[in-house]
Image (cartoon, rainbow, N blue to C red):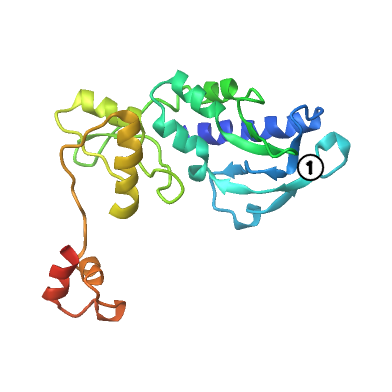
Amino acid sequence: TGDFHAITSAHMLLSAMLDNHIQQGNILNIDPRRIVWKRVVDMNDRELRNIVVGLGGKAHGVPRQDGFDITVASEVMAILCLANSLKDLKERLSKIIVAYSYAGEPITAGMIKAQGAMAALLRDAIKPNLVQTLENVPAIIHGGPFANIAHGCNSVMATKTAMKLAEYTVTEAGFGADLGAEKFFDIKCRYAGLKPDAVVLVATVRALKMHGGVPKTGLAVPNVEAVKKGLV
């Protein structure tokens, strides 16, 4: 749908503006050693995780250590999925901490005036995507923040759109109930004012056995008592 490309572009724009600010006089006194905003690429490329940028002389920037994360790990992805509108998105983007000054003060995207251009790049990506399943059922796919480093849920706008269009809305929280579900209730529902009516837990018998105290080596052995214990 182009959403990931837009998120990558917005993220990389902020990276470029940050480096350009340092190159053009560094009015905010940004400490190049304390830049926390890595670049992103939609590819798990191990060789790019830790790199050195700005080589080639004065015209090519300030040499410093940098690196790449994957696009779905971008804070922009998490922000996109929590935003209620383009205005809200722009406001949230402005609060991203990208670095710290020599005095230890946080430097935000808003301080280098990047939020407007970033929001413009995301103006279409903020719109949920309507697709059709193999069983001809409508589904809305939008966003994909990781649950281990973000909140692991689809966008607030996608869920609210579905609630307006259908009698029942079913959404998924990424990873296990102790991670994705917890963040769904504690973060997404609180931000969006959602009040779920029911919860569907998906669990395997092997997982229940493990919760019941059975080691990995014994999961293939029938053990009803362990399953009962794992349910508690």
Instruction: Where is residue 101? Give x, y as percent.
Output: 72, 37
Res 196 seen here: yes
Between 111 and 132, the one lying in front of the other is: 111
Instruction: Where is residue 150? Give x, y as percent.
Output: 44, 44
Between 170 and 215, the one lying in front of the other is: 215
Check disc 1 and give the amino acid type.
Answer: Gly
Which residue lies at the image location 45% right of the left edge and 28% below the top edge?
125
Which residue lies at the image location 61% right of the left edge and 29% below the top edge?
109
Instruction: Where is residue 213? Give x, y as percent.
Output: 24, 74
- Is 201 above or below relative to 192? below
Res 129 seen here: no
Quadrant into which the C terminus falls = bottom left
- Is 12 above or below relative to 73? above
Label 1: how many residues lie within 10 Å, few (<14), some (14-19) or many (20+)? some
Image side of residue 20 versus residue 155, left or right = right
Q: For residue 53, which quarter of the picture? A: top right
Q: For residue 29, which quarter of the picture? A: top right
Between 106 and 25, the one lying in front of the other is: 106
Instruction: Where is residue 60? Give x, y as percent.
Output: 82, 37
Quadrant into which the N terminus falls = top left
**Disc 1 target residue:** 54
Between 64 and 183, the one lying in front of the other is: 183
Q: Considering the numbered disc 1 on the image, is that residue within a helix, a strand or a loop?
A: loop
* Residue situated furthest right in the rendering: 57
